[in-house]
Each structure stands twice: as structure tokens, then as C-alpha cells.
Amino acid sequence: MSEITSLTLYELIKNIKEKKISSNEAAKSFVDRAEKSKKINVYVTENFENCLKLSKEFDDKPNFDLKLPGIPIAVKDLFCTNEVRTTAGSNILNNFVPTYESTVTQNIWNEGGILLGKLNCDEFAMGSSNETSFFGNVQNPIAEDLVPGGSSGGSSAALAANLTPVTIGTDTGGSIRQPASFTGTVGLKPTYGSCSRYGIVAFASSLDQAGPMSKDVKDSSILLEVISSFDKKDSTSIDFKRNNYSSELTRNIKGLKIGIPKEYRIDGMPDEIEKLWKKGIEYAKDCGAEIIDISLPHTSYALPTYYIVAPAEASSNLARYDGVKYGLRSSGKNLIDMYEKTRSEGFGEEVKRRVMIGTYVLSSGYYDAYYLKAQKVRQLIKQDFDQAYNKVDAILTPSTPSSAFKIGEKSNDPVSMYLNDIFTVPVNLAGLPGISIPAGVDKNNYPLGLQIIGKPFDEQTVLNIAYSMEEKINYKNNITDWWMK
Amino acid sequence: MDEIMSKNNSEYLIERNDNVYEVVIGLEVHAQVTSNSKLFSSSSTKFGAEPNTQVSLVDAAFPGMLPVINEFCVKQAIKTGIGLKAKINNKSVFDRKNYFYADLPQGYQISQYKYPIVGEGNVILDMPEGQKQVGIERLHLEQDAGKSIHDIDPSNTLVDLNRSGVALMEIVSKPDLRSPDEVNAYIKKLRSIMRYLGTCDGNMQEGSLRADVNVSVRIKGSTDLGTRCEIKNVNSIKFMQMAIIYEANRQVDLIEEGQEIDQETRLFDTKKNETRSMRSKEDAHDYRYFPDPDLLPLDVTDEFIDKLKSEIPELPDDKKKRFIDEFKVSPYDATILVSDIDTAKYFEEVVAKMGKNRDIKLAVNWITGELFAVLNDKNIEIAQSPISAKNLAKLINLIKNGTISGKIAKTIFELMLDGDIDPQIIVEEKGLKQESDPKALEALIDKIINDNREKAIEYKQGKEKLFGFFVGQAMKVSGGKANPQLINEILKKKL
């Protein structure tokens, strides 16, 4: 039954509802394939036995009214899962087993989803290549020794390798969209406040947002419908009327105005990205959209702003990992010594770098020059989008300035790594919804993505544009299962 | 001793050589908000529970846990602000104060830094020489930390997180206090206001009220502020006063020796009665305050504030004014009666139960005299008074309507203590009713005059002080029950 694993979520649900495939058959297929796919290293923690057991229970007492009836799903290891180890890709949480469930994953289980396992990611979601994970690199299923993007690299790889029908990631500066772009998959970062942050290991609280990752746009709409909910346990969760994203999904985008921001045409951008963008504009026109040139004047400040705000919040969010209450504790002669040893051994280089940056920008004497200024610039970036949205319904940009790179290629050059986020970061700073869809390939046949950015809470328009462009683009991943050979 | 403390007023001055120094004090009071649950979680705040039994995942800062503001605590802070006649800010912001400590699970304390919920206000102190206004700089909400216990295990520190996340109000005064006496009055007044409002129980033994004391000295008459030292976390008024006296004298000594005072944080050692340096300004923590991204700014509307204003009970200053106006109580007595809400409640209940023929002066005397003596003696609060307001009112009425004499009343009062017994019943059972029948008293006095004829003659010859002897005899023979007023009248007539 190798075809089961290549089905889209929509097709799998249909087959299960029509009793052509049982939940247990589906679970078995994904587990079997995972057993043969250890080489790409997507799983930090497998939940296979339990998944098989729960799928059988579902089949014994099926409920086909659920939105994800008996669907096995693997999730990023940043979501706390009750009684299943949750590491955030870090040694410091290597032994941490939560007694609680994140709201987003709970929403999935409530609709019939079954946990397959916890997917590798950059440590505390800090990274763009999954190379910062304590649990090792993840291979991009597209080609050997290629990074799958990050931080949701295990998620994007699992999806592209047909190891899960859909998955969820988190996106602080591009951590859903960039890995989606690198693996020829779809990744949606919803509006800040759509999906509860409760039970998600925090990186940068004002930017973190969970979102669906899938093989196609329709699947993302199905999963978004499940995970997006107002949650009183998260003070930044917003109580707005959520659409029935999947049933309202339409390819009719005639007359929608799509903005093309000139500031995203950055110096040194590879020709193939420029070409992809142009092609995307043509597709959008073919779909009946009207193309309008716009300006987002503060774009060039977004990356430096992000690399002040995110580390600042992270430096404080990660203070709780001190060896006192849970997780790793190294022994020390006294409290301070214990802290130093625990955090030195528990955190990897990239996390330490960001904690240092964050501590620096918040320290007295530097706060005004860095953090406060960054917050002001953040407002300007937000205003850029507000003004643009007076003229357009959505914005089209490339997802990343390049395709996937080789493992190790950029790991010693943090700044060049940070540049990966240049097109995705402004969206987080402004709290907007953004989707990356596969739109073509580069000279190496590595996938490239286009990003559609929407108005706040207007995920539906973002999905509709992506849905109609997806049909015109007609992208197909060419995965050879090289890791099984 | 070249130190002089002016006792006739509340001023505290230190004389050294030819210089007279005054002490300038500002207080940061940490008052635990009266609330069933914590500031950002639903865990119980009950005092005295087993260690780590009142700790939620949020309080222990588990990964992915988020704070959610407890609206009741916000209301309590606003009410307190209203009680301090302070400006309530429509918008306030929660910040993170970052530092590492074993009993601080998040690695930061959620507090309010730049934008507190309550702004400037004031408190009136009733000092012996008159009223004094003390400015309030601000009031903000923050989380308490847990407790580190160093003395149970020889090699480990144990942590109890029950207190972690409990809501505190930090009330910052302006540097308006000038003496240990004023600090005493200020803390008591704050406590009184918060107890009236029900926003803090003010229980210092349980740590519900603690203060950081900022002390500096300057030549009396100077308007410049000296370099201050902050004495951390002092948990009783007595210790605050001791710490201030020690610290002020230490600073004056330094100045007189020509030395500089270092701005630093100090600890008060209650056993040695001295303050000790904890950390200097150079070693001060950099708390890296920034707005907590897990919490939205706190918006409170004017309607919300107005509604809380309408729920504010009569506060001590207004109550005092009313007691003076309505009950003709002296300002001195009124201050005592309103100082604690339970005393005020007790007094008002006694007044109410006395009914139409009430004697307020008598009631005040009995409460501040006999009753307070008993409470002091038993070391209990008026809320635990062994005599109810109802029965004390009855006793006072019995005096007022002449059923018993004041002297007998004291005997009855003693008997009432044993189970709050109705004084009327005691009077009847023990036959303590005052003898007010003129005929019976006349017969009694006739007998006394007869028995002491010589003294009666001496009196008639002008030895007037013997009158007291006859009154005494009458009281003695009657077993104290004779109505003293009637005795007087009859004696005058008969002698």
C-alpha cells in the first residue's frame, strides 16, 4: 500500500470516510515507510506503537464526522504533547515529557488526528536549515546532503518524503514558509493570534505562530480550519470569526488586486528567483488577478529589526531552562555554577549566540538604541503593509532568496544564514498571514517557492490565491526515495 | 551619646558636633493582594499549605505555559489606588524583570515598570502635632517569587513555589517621611486603608506586607537629597524603625568623618540590629526590563474605574470626620476608633445596638478602656473579642439607665468575658441590680448615720470631707449596689 503515503490529506480523508482505507492501514503505511526512512532523520521521538493502537481503536469505533478521521499526523517537536517527550530540538529538554498538551495539537486530536511522532527541528526553532538541532541534521528528500530548511525542517522533510499526510510547524521569521519552499511543499503562517501559542515551546513570543504544512493548498485549508481557534489560555489569541477555510476555498480570484513590492527586488538576488517571481506574476494574471506595483519602503530594515526583537524575547523566554525544575541539570559547586554548566551543556551554539545578542540589546544603556528602536521600526514596517493594503488585497513575493543549500554550506556563517529569512521576516513583524507554495525549480532542479502575503485575518484570500495559482503552476515534486537505496 | 531624639514631636534629628541632620525616608511597600488565586494563574494563594502544593504549570514556568491576567487582582489594585486618592491609568503595561534565581521559575518576574496601573496619590498621617500628607509615587502589580529554604538540608537549597506568582502591589512613596514615628504611622495608615478596602489583609507575620526602606540624611534645612541606601525586605514596623535609626546614624557618622556614602542595597540583620551591604551600585542587577510579549497592555476604561469607585466603602479619613461630626467623638478618640476597620465596625455596632438612649462617650470609654485592655492582655484582635458588640452595648445601656453603677459594671464585664454572657442575665442571677428605691436607701442611710453619730456631728460642724465617708459606707453596706446619685441626694438631705 505504498500509494497511501503519497495521498494528499484530502484524498486520505475521503478514502477513510468511504472505508476504502482504514485508519490502521494508513498508520501502518506511514510507520513502515518511516522505518525505511531513518536516514533522513525526521523523527526525534516516534509514537508509532501508540499510533497503531489508537488507529485500531478508531477503526473499532469510527467517527466519520470528524475533520481528521483517524488520520496519522507527525508534528514539529516544539509542540508539547501529553506523555510524549518534547525536546524543542535541544539537549536541555532531552528528557522532558510534558503532562499537558498544546492547544493546537489538542485541536488536531479532538478532530480525530493521531500522533505519529515528533519531528526534528532547529534547536528552539532557531535556524534556517535544521542544522542547529541537538538531534542531528535532517536530509532534504529532494537530494542528498541538502538542507530541508528550518526551523521546521523535520516537518518539511517528512512531508516531502511522504512520511506524514500533513504536519504543523511554527513560524517566527519564516520557519514554516522557508522549509516549505526548500522541499516543494506548501506552508502557511497564519495571522498572529489565529493559532494559540499555549503549549508551544516559546522562541519569540510576539512573532511565534503555528501553521499548517501540506502537500497542496487544499490540505492546508483543511488543517488550518482545525488548528485555528480562540484560546483564553493565550492572552494574545484573538477572538475573530474564523472562516470554514476548506469549504470556502475557491479558485475564483477574478479582480483581486495583487501587489508587487519593488523593495523585494534585492541586490544580488539570483536570476532564477527574479524569473520565478515574474512567472508568478503571469500566473496571477492568468488567474484573473490585477497586478499593482507597490512600495514597502522599510523592507530593508526588517531583517536587522527581526534579529533584535527575536533574540531579545528569546533570551528571556529561555531563562526558564536553568536546571532547577525540569530538563537537563549539570552538577555544579553552587547555584551559579550549576546554571552555567547546565546552560553551557544544554544549549547549542546558535541558541547561545541569540541569547547573547538578546541579552545585549536589552541591557541598560543599549535598550533604547536597539530594542526600543527596533520596536519603532517594527511599527513602520506594519504601517507599510497597512498602507499597501489600501490599494491591494494581497502581496506576491518570492519565499526565499535562494533554493535549498548543502548541509554545512552556511553553518559557519550565521549572517548569510540569517539572510534566508529576508522575504519572510517582514510578515512576522507585521503579524500577517503568509503562504509559500512551490512554483518552480532552479538550475539544479531544487524547488523554489512563491509567497503570498495577506491582510490580517484574511487567510481565506491568501489560500484562494494560492489555490488558483497552484493549479496554473502545476508543480510536482520529483522524489526518488534515494535514501532507501 | 551625642545623639538627640526630639520626643515632643515626630521629628527625628541627629546632632553631631554643630550639625543637625534630618533623615529622609521613602518606602516601597510590597502588599500581597487579597485574592483566592494568583496574578497569572488559577492556583490557590492560601497561606501555610504544604510546600509545592499550590503550584500550577504556569507558576513553575513549564515550557509553553502562558500567563493570563487575573481580573480580580486588577480590580483590587485599582481599588487600592482609589483609596490612595491616586490617578488610575487607563493603560498600563506588564514588563519582564529578568534575573536568575532558584525560586524564580521563569527567570524573570512579571512586573510593571514604565507604565504602572496607578500613578500619583497621597496618604494623610495623623501625627500628635497634627496631620501630615505623604505623597504616593505609584502603585504597580507584580508577581511574588517562590521561597528558597537553606536550613533544612545541609548541602541543598530547597524551593517552595507556593508563593510563586502570588499578586503583589508595590506601593512606592515619595521621600516624604522624616522619622521612624512617621514610618510607623504611614505603614499603619496604608494597612488600614487596604484593610478597609479588603485589598490586602496587612498580615505582617505571614509576609503579606513587607517594605524596602530607602534612607538618606541631610543637614536640616537643606532641600537637596543625600545619597540613599535601600534596605531590602524588612517585614515588621519595629525592624523598619530600628533599621532606619541604625542606617541614619551610620550615614551621619560617615559624613562627619568626611566620607562618601555609597548608593547601595543593604540588609537589616535583626539579631545584630545593624544594616549590612548586600550589593553596591556597581554590582546592581541589570534587570533588562522589556514589555512582556505574552501579555497585552492592560486597558481599563473610565466606566470600569467608575464602577469600582462606586464600590469603595467609607475609608478611615471620611469615617473619622463622620464620627467627629455625627457622634461628637473627640478627634483623638476618632483616630483610634477608625485606625482599624474591625475596631470601627465594632464601635459602630455598639452604637447601633445601644438604641435611642445611647451614650456614645461611655461607649468610647468602654471600648478604648476596658475592652482594649482585655484584648491587649490576651493579645488578640478585636475581631476575636470575647465580648460581642451587642452585649457591650447592653452593658452600657444598663449603666446609662441606672440599673447598675459603673463600679458594678466592671464586675459584670469581668464575668461577661467567660463566654460572652448577656449582662442582663448576670445582673439578675447575681442580684447585682442597683438599689434605686428611695425608701430603702433612706432606711439604709438612717442606719449609717445612727451608727456613726459622732462623725455626723463633725460633718455638720464643717468637716465636709466626711461626706465621702458616708457615701463609702452606704456603698459598702449595700454591697456596691446603691445608686450613687440617690445616695448623694439623700445624704445631703439627712445630714
Image (spheres, coloured by chain):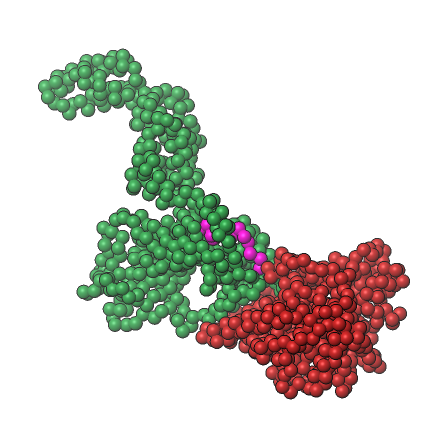
Residue A68 image point, x, y percent: 79, 61
Residue B400 visible here: yes
Q: In the figure, residue A386 lies in which quadrant?
A: bottom right
Q: Quadrant of the C terminus of chain B?
A: top left
- State the image quarter where residue B434 is shown: top left
Q: Residue A303 vs residue B426: left or right?
A: right
| Residue B267 relative to residue A252: left or right | left
Residue occupying image coordinates x 54% and y 74%: A377
Q: State the residue lying farthest toward the left.
A: B461
Q: Is residue B350 left or right of residue A355?
A: left
Q: Quadrant of residue A83?
A: bottom right
State which quarter of the image contains the N terminus of chain B: bottom left
Q: Position of residue B117 (x, y in %)?
A: 47, 57
Provide the major secondary structure of the magenta segment: helix
Q: Nearer the viewer, residue B20 or A416?
A: A416
- Where is residue A438 shown, x and y percent of the image? 75, 76
From the viewer's perspective, is residue A255 above or below residue B433?
below
Residue drawn where x is 41% and y is 23% of the image: B425
Q: Is residue A437 above or below residue B1?
A: below
Q: Residue at horizontal 52%, vertical 58%?
A: B298
- Residue B70 belongs to the span the image colors magenta: yes
Looking at the image, how many numbered discs can be counted on the residues? 0
Magenta residue check for A261: no
* Camera-side residue of A156 and B212: A156
Q: Colour of chain B?
A: green
**Residue at the (81%, 65%) spot, across then down:** A10
Considering depth in this image, is A443 or B282 the residue closer to the camera? A443
| Residue B491 drawn at (x, y percent) | 20, 18
Q: From the image, state the color of chain A.
A: red
The residue range painted magenta reads B67-80
Q: Does any portion of residue A363 appear in the rendered image?
A: no
